[in-house]
Amino acid sequence: MNTLGKVAVIGGGSWATALAKLLLGNCDRIGWYIHRADRIADFIRYGHNPVYLSDVSFDTSRIDFTDDVNEACRDARTLVMVIPSPYFKDTVDKITVDISNHNVVSAVKGIVPDANRIVTDYCADRFGCRPENMLVIGGPCHAEEVALDRLSYLTIGCPDLDKSREFSALLAGKRMKTIVSDDVEGIEYGAVLKNVYAIAAGIVGGMKMGDNFLAMMVCNAIREMGRFVDAIAPLPGRDIDRSAYLGDLLVTAYSRFSRNHNFGSMIGKGYSVKAAMMEMEMVAEGYYGTKCIFDINREGPGVEMPILDCVHAILYRGRTPRQAIAAITDTFS
């Protein structure tokens, strides 16, 4: 039984483009919302995204493009949200059609700023979407490696494991393996935190503190992630060493494709936060995630998170990387 119906991708960046490529491997056609009509026109003219992953070719006759988010939602049953978190609220708040019975898939890998909510929680509150229709896509997976057809793995989370398997089948292929999970909140919060820790890893790399210290930081980061996720979204049997948590952390902390690592590296080399952000061609989700998780932890569970606090001190409280890193080195074990 097909419970997913037509799938629409909401967003036009590199991750949206990679996911659209995977979906078209298993779907006859998809909808695709890209907010700029000129980019849609160029996409159709050239057969590829004119801005992101431009080496990936598409059969555009199988894509229903639109620059109207409500049209995309009306024509689809499953919405794959792939909007950078800073722009997520502005985009989805334009949705006026009823999507309460839609399947909503979060591939945002970030948190909704100001609202301080993960995407599935925000959609549940804003649109009345039901928990059993909420899915999340977790890593470890970079869009660039999907574009290069390198063997990759994705975890699909949904409280309804049958639906998780059904959506997983739409992404799976010879070079893409999928894993199912029922831990939607854990995967979402983990995806936010791994970006924070990737900034920390980049800072350490930019300061040339060495691989020994970096390994120690990442080792402590996964335990810190586990403490927070278990406190904010308890789930019996969660294994923080699974690929959706530890694997996603590792690839984001170490990969040359990691924009969060690269952002942190600039800061570690002496760039100001403002200058580093101006240099970035794409959004470093961890910048926004740092403040959101810091505020959530302060107002909620209050677990010990020295690495998060360190990154927050650098990005938002004017501490130098050297000062902030020095303050946490004795907390590692």
Image (spheres, rainbow, N blue to C red):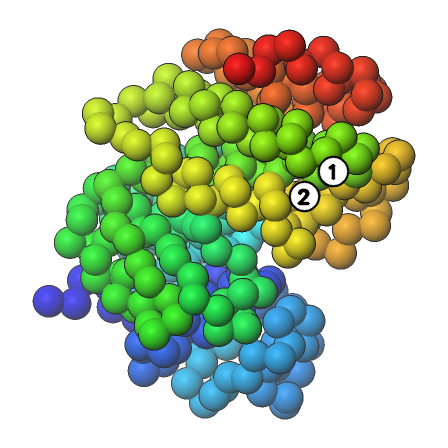
Return the residue nearer the eye: 81 or 236. Answer: 236
Is residue 111 visible in the rendered structure shown here? Answer: no
Question: Viewed as shown, does residue 266 lie left or right of 57?
Answer: right
Disc 2: which residue: 261
Of circles 1 and 2, which is in front?
1
Residue 253 sits above or below residue 229 on the image? below
| Relative horizontal placement of residue 111, taking residue 239 as reference (left or right) | right
Quadrant housing residue 263: top right
Q: Amino acid at mark 2?
A: His
Residue 165: % across, % down: 21, 57
Please state the horizontal and vertical placement of residue 122, each as a whole percent of the image. 43, 37
Q: Is residue 109 left or right of residue 49?
A: left
Residue visible at 68% across and 19% down in the picture: 310
Image position of 195 with respect to 78: above or below: above
Q: Which residue is mark 1?
A: 205
| Residue at the extreme left | 1
Question: Which residue is nearer to you in this view: 14 or 196?
Answer: 196
Viewport quadrant of the N terminus: bottom left
Q: Secondary structure at mark 2?
A: helix
Instruction: List the single residue furthest toward the front.
Output: 212
Instruction: Please state which amino acid type lies under the numbered disc 1.
Output: Gly
Q: Residue 286's spot in the image, x, y percent? A: 62, 37
Residue sitting nearer the eye, 74 or 245: 245
Q: Position of residue 18 (x, y in %)?
A: 50, 67
Q: Nearer the viewer, residue 212 or 190?
A: 212
* Residue 12, above or below 62: above
Identified at 59% across, 32% down, the residue is: 215
Cβ–Cβ under 8 Å for marks 1 and 2: yes
Label 1 packing within 10 angstroms: few (<14), some (14-19), many (20+): many
Residue at 67% from the left image edge and 49% from the top image edge: 259
